[in-house]
């Protein structure tokens, strides 16, 4: 009796939502069949027809390129230190937020906090697990294990560095130290293995992170310059923005790779990877500048008037009142630009011959064991999965940031 | 307040003006927006502790006058002197006058990304260089004064219009200004919230603050003002005590305006 009622409920739902009219019915059947077919094809590719041994064999090449065996330990140490650094930073920031009243200091039950971490990190975690399962040695398992422990220890220690009793000098030392760690790690790795021998997904990530960090302040300066009252500054910034936005990124990368040699002697010219970072930075900064300018224009006049009326200097009006609101308003557009920058690092492979992930994905299908077997589908799919994972995580974190900063929305 | 009291205050203020302690002086001030003359030949002296209410039809230049005093608008001719300092194009000079002059806007203009307390303490900390602790104590005292200390950690968007405007008043007062300028402070408020803001302003006036208030609240003008200034078409048409102004105005333009609004 109740089963019939239930079934008739489902039938009613289907009739109402899928088969309301003859056209609806045809479309429902058509798209239903199409979806089923797509799911079937995908599953059979992933689990049956796909030849994933090409990934398994070349996993290391895809992740770190031709990084020499002798120095892989430095990468492992870097990963562990970065994990501890990230955990420490998270704890430190949280303690500071509680101190300044921007976060509540209520004790959240451990289960809820772990749930929150899981909700944020499950996707990258699943992909890392997949990579570990694909790897044929124990090394990566050990590194990831130690990194997780390091991150947890960092998270537990971090809040102590955010305590008020450290005073402004102590806090300054902590902040400077936090800024110095990534730079020190860079030199730790690069003194052993020159920048141009880096490769794989590691190189994509590194190019993107460096360019993002550098293009952000440059973009803000360009935006402010374009709105400057000094004609020379305005003209220079506007010309720069319009010139760079008008050129294809690919062409700029080619120019940096080829044409630079005509102007600068080879001994003075920066390495190829450095050139790539410079081009990505300069290119994205021009776009960022326009996004930030849009944000500046979205701040109502009254805000500037109020800032003036309480006696803030022009620099402080900008720094405390206008920029924070402007940047908050354009988080979605900014993040779109940064995701785009991250994916564009693949262009450096083709334009400059850097051995980044997409380049590796193409090259390994030409190995003697795999040549002529049409495995590009497998390698490209795998590369796409890695890019998508990072890009999607960036997108979600940006939405989270928007929500956090939206506390006092107008 | 009896009539005697009020005229006594007025006499007192006049006397101060006479003895040269004018807090604000405008002499022959002109202001153009393009070709449109927004202010022509404005002359006004405001004594210390005096409350001057500026009324007039919209577009008459009321707001422009007070916006010229703290250089949110630049006047094209004439002199503006605030507490002995003449307003010039020197940015330091402008900053100095803005430090001494509080302003309350029609649309509040609170900083939406800062908490209520941070809205109030920002300028004292960055401009007056107060340490954080002292600024926060000052900020809380200001919030007590406008009777909403419990809202300190909220954001402006979480407050009612009347509360926001009181925070805006507290924000201005935290700079310990010598003059307060009010630009239609109740025009954007729902009717039931107007009184809480007017009451705050009345207390401020009673405490001896020098105030110039642009408003359409005739009750407030009648009760609190030492003098009423009536403006039309960018000119000051008539200046007088509230009694004179509301009971027995001399100019036809004033009579017409009063007949339209009362």
Image (tube, coloured by chain):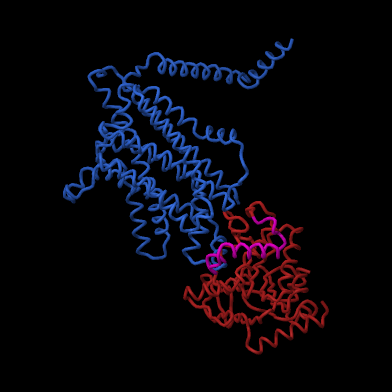
Chain colours: A blue, B red
Residue A111 within the segment the image draws in magenta: no
Task: Tell me the magenta residue range.
Answer: B124-152
In the image, residue B40 above or below residue A348: below
Q: Position of residue B31 (x, y in %)?
A: 55, 75
Residue at image point 60% right, 69% down: B175
Q: Quadrant where the N terminus of chain A lies?
A: top right
Relative depth, front residue between A102 and A96? A96
Q: Position of residue A234 (x, y in %)?
A: 38, 61
Q: Position of residue A63 (x, y in %)?
A: 33, 31
Residue A235 is drawn in which quadrant?
bottom left
Query: Horizontally, is A348 left or right of B129 in the view?
Result: left
Residue at image point 43% right, 54% down: A173
Residue at image point 48% right, 37% down: A152
Relative depth, front residue between B260 and A340? A340
**Is residue A377 shown to the viewer in this render?**
no
**Is residue A229 shown to the viewer in this render?**
yes
């Amino acid at each position: 009796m109740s089963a019939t009622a239930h079934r008739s409920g489902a039938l009613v739902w289907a009739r109402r939502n899928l088969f309301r009219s003859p056209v609806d019915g045809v479309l429902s059947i058509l798209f239903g069949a199409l979806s089923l077919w797509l799911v079937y094809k995908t599953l059979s590719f992933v689990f049956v027809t796909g030849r994933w041994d090409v990934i398994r064999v070349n996993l290391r090449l895809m992740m770190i390129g031709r990084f020499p065996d002798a120095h892989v330990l430095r990468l492992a140490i870097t990963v562990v230190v970065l994990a501890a650094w990230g955990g420490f930073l998270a704890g430190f920031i949280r303690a500071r937020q509680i101190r300044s009243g921007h976060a509540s200091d209520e004790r959240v039950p451990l289960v809820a906090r772990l749930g929150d971490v899981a909700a944020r990190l499950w996707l990258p975690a699943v992909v890392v697990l997949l990579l570990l399962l694909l790897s044929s040695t124990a090394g990566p398992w050990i590194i990831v294990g130690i990194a997780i422990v390091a991150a947890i220890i960092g998270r537990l220690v971090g809040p102590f560095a955010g305590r008020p009793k450290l005073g402004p000098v102590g806090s300054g030392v902590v902040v400077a130290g936090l800024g110095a760690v990534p730079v020190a790690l860079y030199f730790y790795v690069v003194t052993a293995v020159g920048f141009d021998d880096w490769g794989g997904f590691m190189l994509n990530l590194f190019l993107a992170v460096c360019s993002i960090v550098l293009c952000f302040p440059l973009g803000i300066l360009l935006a402010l310059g374009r709105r400057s009252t000094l004609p020379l500054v305005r003209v220079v910034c506007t010309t720069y923005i319009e010139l760079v936005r008008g050129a294809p990124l690919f062409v700029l990368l080619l120019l940096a790779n080829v044409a630079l040699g005509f102007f600068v002697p080879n001994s003075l010219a920066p390495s190829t990877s450095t050139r790539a970072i410079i081009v990505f930075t300069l290119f994205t900064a021009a776009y960022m500048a326009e996004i930030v300018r849009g944000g500046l224009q979205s701040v109502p006049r009254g805000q500037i008037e109020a800032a003036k009326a309480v006696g803030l200097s022009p620099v402080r009006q900008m720094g405390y009142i206008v920029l924070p609101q402007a940047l908050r308003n354009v988080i979605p557009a900014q993040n779109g630009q940064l995701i785009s920058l991250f994916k564009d690092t693949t262009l450096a492979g083709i334009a400059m011959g850097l051995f980044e992930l997409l380049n590796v994905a193409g090259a390994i299908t030409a190995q003697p064991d795999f040549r002529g077997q049409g495995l590009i589908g497998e390698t490209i799919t795998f590369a796409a999965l890695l890019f998508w994972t990072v890009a999607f995580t960036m997108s979600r974190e940006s939405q989270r940031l928007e929500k956090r900063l939206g506390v006092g929305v107008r | 307040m009896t009539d005697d009291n009020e005229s006594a205050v007025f006499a007192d203020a006049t006397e101060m003006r006479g003895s040269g302690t004018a807090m604000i002086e405008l002499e022959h001030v002109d202001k153009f927006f393009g070709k449109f003359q927004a202010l022509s030949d404005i002359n006004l002296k405001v004594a210390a502790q005096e409350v001057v209410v500026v009324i007039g039809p919209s577009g008459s230049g009321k707001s422009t006058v007070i916006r010229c005093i703290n250089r949110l608008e630049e006047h094209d001719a004439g002199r503006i002197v605030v507490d002995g300092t003449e307003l010039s194009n020197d940015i330091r000079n402008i900053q100095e006058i803005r430090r001494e002059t509080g302003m309350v806007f029609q649309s509040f203009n609170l900083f939406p990304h800062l908490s209520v307390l941070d809205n109030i303490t920002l300028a004292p900390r960055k401009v007056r260089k107060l340490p954080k602790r002292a600024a926060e104590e000052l900020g809380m005292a200001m919030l007590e004064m406008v009777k909403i200390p419990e809202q300190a950690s909220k954001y402006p968007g979480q407050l009612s219009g009347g509360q926001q405007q009181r925070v805006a008043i507290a924000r201005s007062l935290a700079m310990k200004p010598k003059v307060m300028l009010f630009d239609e402070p109740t025009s954007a408020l729902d009717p039931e919230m107007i009184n809480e803001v007017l009451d705050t302003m009345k207390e401020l006036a009673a405490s001896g603050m020098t105030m110039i208030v642009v408003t359409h609240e005739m009750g407030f003008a009648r009760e609190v003002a030492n003098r009423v200034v009536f403006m039309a078409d960018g000119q000051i048409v008539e200046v007088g005590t509230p009694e004179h102004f509301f009971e027995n105005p001399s100019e036809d333009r004033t009579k017409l305006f009063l007949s339209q609004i009362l």
